[in-house]
Image (tube, coloured by chain):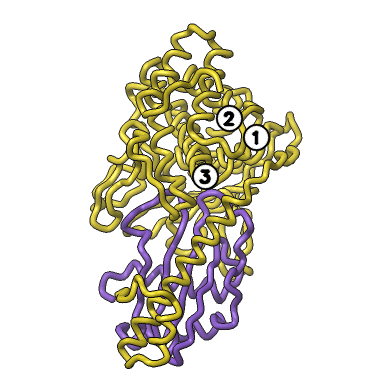
Amino acid sequence: MRILFRTEGGFAYFPGLSAERSIDADALTDPKRRALRRLIRQARFFDLPERVGVPKRCPPDCHRYFITVIDDDDRVHTIMTAEPVADSRLASLVAYLQALDLDDDD
Amino acid sequence: MPIYPILPPFMLRHIVRAGDAEERRRAQYTLARDRVIRSARMELMANIQDVVVMTPPPPKGRRGRGLRRTIYIFKPHSRRKLPGQRVRTEGRPPLGDPAVDEAYDGLGIAYRFLREVFGRHSVDDHDLPLAATVHYSSKYSNAFWNGEQMVFGDGDLKLFSRFTGSLEIIGHELTHGIMQYTAQMNYTLQAGAVHESICDVMGILLKQWSLGQTVEASDWLIGAGLLMPGINGAALRSMKAPGTAYDDPLLGADPQPGHMDDFRRMQHDNGGVHINSGIPNRAFYLTAAALGGNAWERAGKVWYNTLCDKRLRPHYGFKRFARLTLRSAAELFGEQSIEASAVREAWAQVGISSLEGG
């Protein structure tokens, strides 16, 4: 399973943080891989529409997130969501992906 | 990876069907990536096409009620709804929680600044109560205005510290609210960069006013002190010298231009609204620097007057905004005034000239 994660918008633009992050689930430690798979399953990611809670006009400085998951059955799904992420399960997935972004050891 | 950046989608889909495992994986990756990029492009186009001239909403407050602040703490487990749990209201003593008390104090300073310097009664000019939610989400490195209130994160504490710790950020976010009730500038491309720049201008003026700082004494930094120790940078943006705020292995190098020659055309960041804002930011700094003294007294009045000018249309880019600042300076101080001259010269120095007429 591979996850692509990109954050757009925010109070400032940082070239080093704007790049799309590619996460190979198989390269993660067992607990992290299991947690990630559980969060994707709990968010019912492949059943989500392409836009989840994204208003027509996003508020200024608001973060938007682009998440793509390619699962082991070769299914590919991309969604866009925006802060505040009202769906708590999707919010948990976003928070986890952000935390993975902060880890240097993955 | 990505390995197949120039292959058309139909060929990639063929590779997904017929390629070996590794080829399939690469093609899937590229297809997925294209899909993300397409989504972003569609969104930007939707925003650009959504250039509707909207009437500003009617004021929600009641003039004469004065300053009324409410600070909330975000509760992630209560359906993640804003504003959250109310923890401090007007007149209540400090809570001892730095984020709560910084937001409370910052909103108070901002209210007095608007009232005393510009005669404005809060965000809507009708004493709209000021609300802010702090401790938003978890390790959240951002601040934003959601159309009704301000929202502040605590920072990830690796790159960024608390967003309430910076008064100019509080002023910046509050100004997004003012924009909502006045100019309603678009939030894409040049108009979006003007929008962002006006928020930075008001943010830095708030900081200078609160500290009693002259043009010369100010650092002209937005988000000073926000970057964690160890990060190579002084702030998020520099209005005096755009492009010099940070240069760090994790953050990258500050991409802001300070002149039209370096204007960035891009799809990210709503067409570079936080990047190209460096150009009008520097024009404001140069105006203030030419006039000296307290920036809020003359340069600030010109910019605020422009923000409230009914001739300012939501889609106006740099040049038309610049023309209006020159008209404001002429109307406030006279056509032959040193203020009008300073405005004209400042815009010329960032590559925007011929402001008369149009």
Label 2 element class: helix
- Residue A105: % across, % down: 26, 74
Residue A49: image quadrant is: bottom right
| The chain in yellow | B
Neighbours of disc 2 within 10 Å: few (<14), some (14-19), many (20+): many
Discs 3, 2 touching: Cβ within 8 Å? no
Chain A color in figure: purple
Q: Which-is-in-front pick, marks 3 and 1? A: 1
Q: Which residue is mark 1?
A: B182
Label 1 element class: loop
> Sequence order check: which comes first, mark 3 or mark 1?
3
Q: CA distance from mark 3 to mark 1?
A: 24 Å
Chain ID of residue with mark 3:
B
Q: Which residue is located at x 48 percent, y 17 percent?
A: B298
Residue B235, numbered circle: none
Amino acid beneath label 3: Ala
- Residue B213: % across, % down: 39, 24
Q: CA distance from mark 3 to mark 2?
A: 25 Å
> Sequence order check: which comes first, mark 2 or mark 1?
1
Q: Which residue is mark 2?
A: B307
Decide which of B95, B104 is in the foreground and name it.
B104
Neighbours of disc 1 within 10 Å: few (<14), some (14-19), many (20+): many
Q: Are marks 3 and 1 on the same chain?
A: yes
Q: Which residue is located at x 61 percent, y 38 percent?
A: B314
Q: Is residue B127 above or below residue A33?
A: above
Q: Which residue is mark 3?
A: B103
Q: Is residue B295 above or below residue B245?
A: above
